[in-house]
Image (cartoon, grey):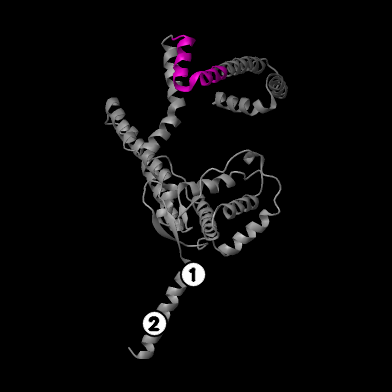
Amino acid sequence: MSRIQWALVLLVVVLAVALAGLFWSPVTTVPGSSSGVQNVALFPGSNTPGAAPAADSFQAALSHAETLAATPASLRGTEVDGQLQTTADGELVVTPDLRRVFDYFLSAQGEEPLEDCQARLASYLQASLPAEAANEAWQFFQQYMALGQAMAALPPHDGSPASIRTAVKQRHDLQVAYLGQQAAEAFYGMDIAYDRYMADRQDILDNLSLSDTQRQQRLQGLTQSLPAAMQSMLAETRGPAQLAARTQALREQGASEADIRRLREQQFGADGAARLEALDQQRAQWEARYQGYREQRQAIIDSGLSHLDQETALARLQQQMFSDQELDRVEALDRIQAR
């Protein structure tokens, strides 16, 4: 190769390195399932076709923030969910809390336009972080929003373990493509672990070769293999359902309301038990009212009235017995009863 050709090759390499420096920025991340701090590369706006450069969109959002009206009602009196972190050198540390901060401001969608939610977030980032870290956080936010659109376009799974695993892999691949491996773990590590757990759990439930005892042992072992934080989350999620099942079993065995109250107080305290008793009363009153309506409804149907007169009488009955807010539920229950 001639010296001219070598010079051209060297020039291309130098330009490539220089351009890479413009479009890659180091960001410190703390994965959701790891205690280590690692560096990953961020691609600002590269997955958002036609998007404005990150710095420009950040400044535009900050300018828009100056025109905003009062804070949305759902955010008033609340604190931002999540703590933003930086290193001693002022670099952004990407933790699960960064995603929580994003979601906190996005939760106001519906009360105000998305543009306003983003402007409030931009203002918060500027006030809470050093300038460079605030820009890095905004770049991550742009990638996060683009990722959300991409994941929403994925086909849904059919509930089978194989389909769930395919969907989990598709989402994880997108998360890594948009955020990088370590940042994807920080943002979605718990979500991915939970999805995989649900697929493994369904495998156990669908395994007809297992006895009930074997199935329960495997389910228990699967749960115990999860990180402690996820085990706690599952326990809190399943607590009400497990209590409802135990309550029903006690009632079928002839337990008194005092027995039911003691069980509830053990799990939720006296105030929680009182709320559940009030809910029981509301449900009983609703069921009695709906049953009375069903009896009168059937009497109208059996009355021999014309179809038009029946419809008129049924509409009048519904208006007499239920509020406007309850009518949708009544009509849905009627459709279920007619099947």
Residue 305 is left or right of residue 81, and the answer is right
- Does the image show residue 27? yes
The part of the chain drawn in magenta is 255-279
Any mark on residue 285, and which? none
Question: Considering only vertical position in the picture, is 51 above or below 190?
Answer: below
In the image, is residue 26 above or below residue 334?
below
- The residue lying toward the viewer, choosing from 64 and 52, is 64
Question: What amino acid is labelled 2 in the image?
Answer: Leu
Q: Quadrant of residue 301?
A: top right
Residue depicted at 38% across the width and 34% down the height: 231
Please tell me whether mark 2 sits on a helix, a strand or a loop. helix
Task: Please state which of residues 173 and 308 is positioned toward the viewer in this rendering.
Answer: 173
In which quadrant of the rendered image does the C terminus lie?
Answer: top right
Q: Is residue 20 above or below residue 26?
A: below
Which mark is drawn over residue 10? 2
Q: Percent from the top left, x then y, of residue 292?
A: 62, 14
Asked whether, in this view, residue 160 is left or right of residue 46, the answer is left
Identify the main secondary structure in magenta.
helix
Which callout, 1 or 2, points at the residue further toward the start of the chain? 2
Across and down, in percent, residue 329 comes to 61, 27
- Quarter of the picture holding the N terminus: bottom left
Give how far across and how far down residue 175 sits, in percent: 44, 53
What number is the disc on residue 22?
1
Magenta stretch holds residue 208:
no
